[in-house]
Image (cartoon, rainbow, N blue to C red):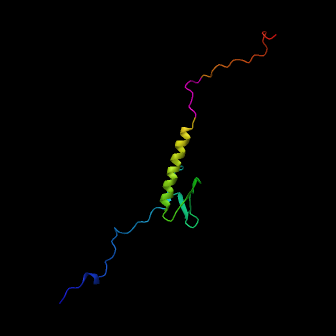
Amino acid sequence: MGKRKKSSRKPGAPSAARRRQPLDTAFTCLFCHHDKSVTVRIDRKEGIAQLVCRVCDQRYQSKTNHLTEAVDIYSEWIDAADAAQKDTQSHRRPVASSSRLAPVAPPSVGSDDEG
């Protein structure tokens, strides 16, 4: 009697560790902090993704490709919000160190030197 060849055996069932777990599609809003209020819609045909918060109506739109997932758009939104916050902080005018205003000279109405 001979042994069976390995190639003739059927593959076993896939293990639970090998299965890909689905990525999140609902996220926490950066502005109103509600859990699972932000949803992402990806239109692969048009190449546009839209992110919308159902509570505070915050919106973000980005270009996509065939590899883009919802979590990628959410991370782009986080990066864009951080960049906008840094930009507004750098463009603020410095606050004066003293609360006093500089004295203003009164306008001269008429002087006696004119002749």
Residue 54 vs residue 47, the one in the foreground: 47
**Would you say residue 95 sits in the magenta stretch?**
yes
Q: Judge whether 33 appears above or below 19 on screen.
A: above
Between 56 and 51, the one nearer to me in the picture: 51
- Residue 92 visible (yes or no): yes
Residue at 48%, 59% (x, y): give it: 71
Percent x, y of residue 32: 54, 50
Choose top left, top right, bottom left or bottom right for residue 63. Answer: bottom right
Residue 102 placement, left or right of 22: right
> Where are the magenta residues, as a range?
93-99
Where does residue 14 sit, x and y in percent of width and height? 34, 74
Residue for point 54% across, 42% down: 87
Q: Relative to residue 71, is residue 30 depicted above or below?
A: above
- In the rendered image, the residue lying farthest to the right is 115
Residue 42 in the image: state x and y as whole percent.
54, 63
Is residue 33 at all visible to an observer of this figure?
no
How would you classify the magenta stretch by its main secondary structure?
A: loop
Q: Nearer the viewer, residue 42 or 26?
A: 42
* Residue at image location 52% in from the left, 63% down from the top: 65
Residue 72 horizontal side relative to residue 48, left or right = left
- Verify whether residue 26 appears in magenta: no
Q: Is residue 8 above or below residue 51?
A: below
In the current view of this chain or complex, which residue is farthest to the left? 1
